[in-house]
Amino acid sequence: MQAKSPGRIAKPPKTLAQCCTDVDCHAGRRNRYYFGKHLSPHSYEVEQQYQSERRRLINRAVIGWGVVYGYPLSLQPQASPGEEGRALRLGAGLALDACGRELLQVEPICLELKDVLAFDVDGKLLRTALPWADAKSKCWLLRVHYAERLIGPVRTKDNCGCEACQWDQICETVKYSLTPVDCGRCCERSACGLDCECSSSACCDGSAKALKDFDCSGGQPLPMNTPRGGCRCLCEHLSKLNPDCECGDLCAVEPTLSVDLHNGVALACVALEQDACGEWTIQVVIDDCGPRRLVKRNDLLFDLIRGCDLTRIAAIGWPSWHRSAELIGWEAFEQSFGTFAKGDETSVTKAYWISFTKPVRLETLRADCFVMRIIIPDEESGWGQQLRVPICGVQTDALPGADVATKATLIVDAGWICETILGSRIMFDTHIACVEIEVRGDFILDCNGQPVDANAVGLAPYPSGNGTPGDTFLSTFRVEARDRKRVFSKPAGTLEGVPS
């Protein structure tokens, strides 16, 4: 054994009383089980509270808060035809509030005003007269709140033998509320939670050598080979977040019902009106998507990454020509511009049309969304000179009065066709021509207001898209030179359609 140092006095071991010090535990307290432990109602409450708080912490910190799915809204019709209902039908749904509590409704219900909590404009709960009489010129925000209801009454006896009534279980449920709001706030865009500012330091991932002599506090620019600074932004943003949240106690609104009044999740904006009997009812659902904060589930995020919500080019009128290694015959190219009568100023092309996977807005579907270029070598220099085909307009398949379409056909200047395509002596007589057709997806908005995902993908003529909105669809093909000895037996306006 190693000898003790001289002059060092060995301390006696601590007694059990000295070891047993009760400390405050704010991070989470749970039971420790051992033989002989006496379990009381308080012991089970500690265990239950620990499990609930940990689950809610994960919910709000990892998943977020808002509507997960469900909660569809529709007006419930009355028995008499032609009248809107007094009740709003709410479908089953799941939401998470800012405290991480699950707001679960497992079956559809009909919501009447008598079952709804009412708040004033300052968010104060009105326990007496409901302010529906002042509802004509206002919008009302419908929210869902976490609530607990005591159920299962039982008779118990205390230590003195006196009987008392207790509740055997707690039912986790939801309660709905209406708050008057300015109608302009019904569809306010939520602010970005992440706000990146310029940072003078970098994230380390293999660039330690480059940062060895770098002064992170001097505000100097980052070395060129440092990684992307987004990791620094995320680190600073997450470092400022507090794992705790300000979630107070539930407020008793009925003898057996308690509700979290401060952390409701918005579902819709509605309007109230009086029916024929003078009773206030929910008559109009103004917007049931704009007010909602949505939780992005993993499957939804992956679908968004893949661009499943985007509109793409579904088909084009020249699929066999797209990036073809073979030369396109001159006669087929000539016929692709369609037929027109003498005196017509324009010609609706036969081959140059584009269809989309979803309707696109007519107001954005214009001639400048499309470009058609013909590239022919210059006689003297041999450089390719670009000639733009004069696209005069677009013909769509939109029905009368509609504001969306799914197909667009290019309209070309008829005079240009006569002179350039049908002329007796043209530039196509001696050279192979390269044709380029562009569809500018950034210019075309679909029915949801998003640009068309128009990127061409390899050799495939369609569908287009790389998972991001916008960009350009580019199609190319080459046309053989026209034979000078060709006899022009067909006058302008007698061209046949493009062979299928």
Image (cartoon, rainbow, N blue to C red):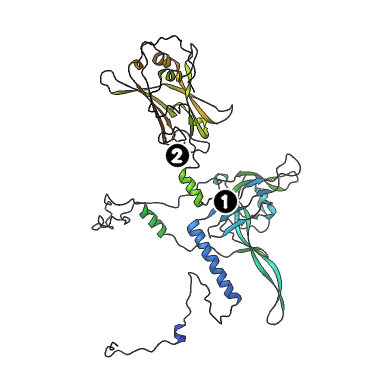
Residue type indicated by callout 1: Tyr
* Residue 388, visible in the rendered structure: yes
Quarter of image, res 176: bottom right
Q: Which residue is mark 2?
A: 469
Residue at x 52%, y 52% (from the top left corner): 295
The correct choice, above or below, for 168 with respect to 409 in the image is below
In the picture, which quadrant includes the N terminus? bottom left
Question: Around disc 2, counting alpha carbons within 10 Å, would you say few (fewer than 14), some (14 to 19), or many (20 or more)?
Answer: many
Q: Residue furthest front?
A: 326
The correct choice, above or below, for 261 with respect to 416 in the image is below
The correct choice, above or below, for 442 with respect to 261 in the image is above
Q: Which residue is mark 1?
A: 69
Left or right: 386 in relation to 175: left
Residue 354 picture location, percent across and down: 48, 29
* Residue 122, visible in the rendered structure: no
Front residue (pair 106, 456): 456
> Is the residue under label 2 in contact with that under label 1 (CB below 8 Å)?
no
Q: Which badge, 1 or 2, comes first in the chain's sequence?
A: 1
Residue 305 picture location, percent across and down: 45, 46
Front residue (pair 245, 383): 383
Q: Which mark is residue 411?
A: none
Residue type indicated by callout 2: Pro
Whole-Å distance between the Cαs marked 1 and 2?
Answer: 25 Å
